[in-house]
Image (spheres, coloured by chain):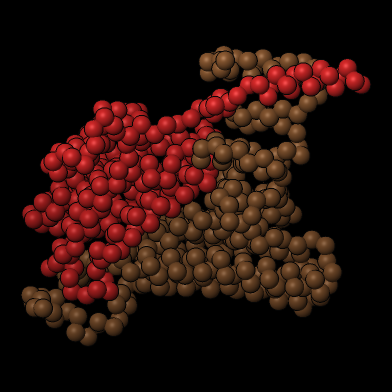
Amino acid sequence: TMASPDDLKFQEFEEATDLLLADPGASTLSMSGSSSTAPAGATGDIKLDMSDDEGQEESSELLRGEKQTSGFWTFEYYQSFFNVDTMQVLDRVKRSLVPLPGRNFIKHTLQSSPDLYGPFWICVTLVFSLAISGNLSTFLNSLGSPDYHYRPQFHRVTIAAVVIFLYAWLVPLGVWGFLTWRQREERQQSGYSFLETVCVYGYSLFIYIPTSVLWILPFEWLRWLLILVAMVISGSVLVLTFWPVVRDDTQVTAFATVATIVVLHALLSIGCKMYFFQTATRTPVPTLAPNHTAPQLTNKTH
Amino acid sequence: MAQVEETSKRMFAGLSDVSISGDIPVEGEINVPVGTPSQDKEYSTLDEPVKDTILRDLKAVGKKFVHVMYPKKSSALLRDWDLWGPLLLCVTLALMLQGGSVDSKEDGGPQFAEVFVIIWFGSVIITLNSKLLGGTISFFQSLCVLGYCIMPLTVAMVVCRLVLLGGSWGFSFIVRLIVVTASFSWSTFASTAFLADCQPPNRKALVVYPVFLFYFVIGWMILTFSPSA
């Protein structure tokens, strides 16, 4: 006769414990949470069909031991780039603000665990801080003139986003590509991965966030001084990171590489300052300048 | 050797006698999404009048608005997620942000599509960010929470448009600044109350900061709305 379902469950558990008592070394598989008792060989084969939440918890734990074994089409692959805590992010930001000679950002601060959280959100914050501060400074500049009509100038957000994100991704790509190619040519040992390059560029942009806010103050000498300070700090983070890699190369290549990095960085900051924070002498929208004042005072007809 | 074989055969024989008609009992938590209350399962909702269907959904949306007004740590908002409320709020906000600085498309405020994209794209990015950091909230639940918590900012937009009828600068600006600041803090606080529990404790700030930035940007769009001359 068939036993009732309750009896069946109880019997099965007993059987399992009996089996274990007979052979304690047998491999066990627990179906709940993180299986710390599962042997190393089983983790790759067994796919546990768990809910979304538990699955991520388990695989991120596994990934700490084995780096990036998932394919790039899985969610866990991208989760490995966000494996940072609050204190870690704050620490990395602090180190990017205080570059000390001999402190290679990638080697000392990142320590082979680059993250994408910092670069991404620093870029987003920088985009909005540039657009908002630029808008505020234009407004403050024109506060005296009676025919100025405040405009949010929202298109600046789009432009800032394109410029910052292109810089933060294309320049590291170029630098990494060039360094990897030279490394293969000269057979050098150390090289940085693409992610580490993106990471150091992202964190080096942090200094521009307070700089862009301070650029609101309408003093030209202050703005250029701020650019200088920001360039020195941010540039030295980059130079201190990349110099140890290129110095084994020929003198010309080494200096050219470092010089290019610094020049590109300078172009970014000067370009941002000139576009978003225009001086009071120039009108904000030069294209509309001649006919602009007259229609302002009359009603618009469409 | 034969003895071991016999005992194992006996044990395995016992196992094979056990007929498992149902599932293997699994340990652990299974989150069964509790959607509609159980009495709905007893009758098909196809036969009910359309008015009942609409009213039920409207009541659910209304209940969530109340939850945003008084954010307690209740899980009702998370369980029965819906995107009607966020859609309604987003469209209302985007429509109200139109009609300002109509002289040129270049220098004006955000276009309808821009507001829409910022709100939805921003919510998606924040949700992805929180999931990548190891959050246990599901994708649509997070979209639902972020969308509903725009409500204080929409209310602020209505207030701002009313205040703007009485002039743009001076006292009106101070009132608008206070209203927008208060509502953006309320939005951030409300959504953090719902979202922060789903994060590991050492990453809470990493998740809260993008939410703060999101509502700050929306608040700035509202504050800088200036009607046409």
Q: What is the x, y in percent for residue A138?
A: 31, 67
Residue at the bottom extreme of this rendering: A290
Instruction: Give the residue at x 70% y 19%.
Output: B14
- Looking at the image, is B26 positioned above or below residue A11? below
Residue B109: give x, y in percent of width and height: 25, 65
Location of the N terminus of chain A by quadrant is top right
Q: Would residue A115 be found to the left or right of residue A17 on screen?
A: left
Say which quarter of the image contains residue B5.
Answer: top right
Which one is nearer the viewer's eye here, A52 or A152?
Answer: A52
Among the chains, which one is red?
B
Write the residue at 70% across / 73% down.
A178
Occupied quadrant, residue A235? bottom right
Q: Which chain is brown?
A: A
Can residue B69 be spotted in the picture?
no
A197 is higher (above) or lower (below) than A12: below
In the image, A53 versus A109, the foreground residue is A53
- Give the left or right position of residue A283, taking residue A214 as reference: left
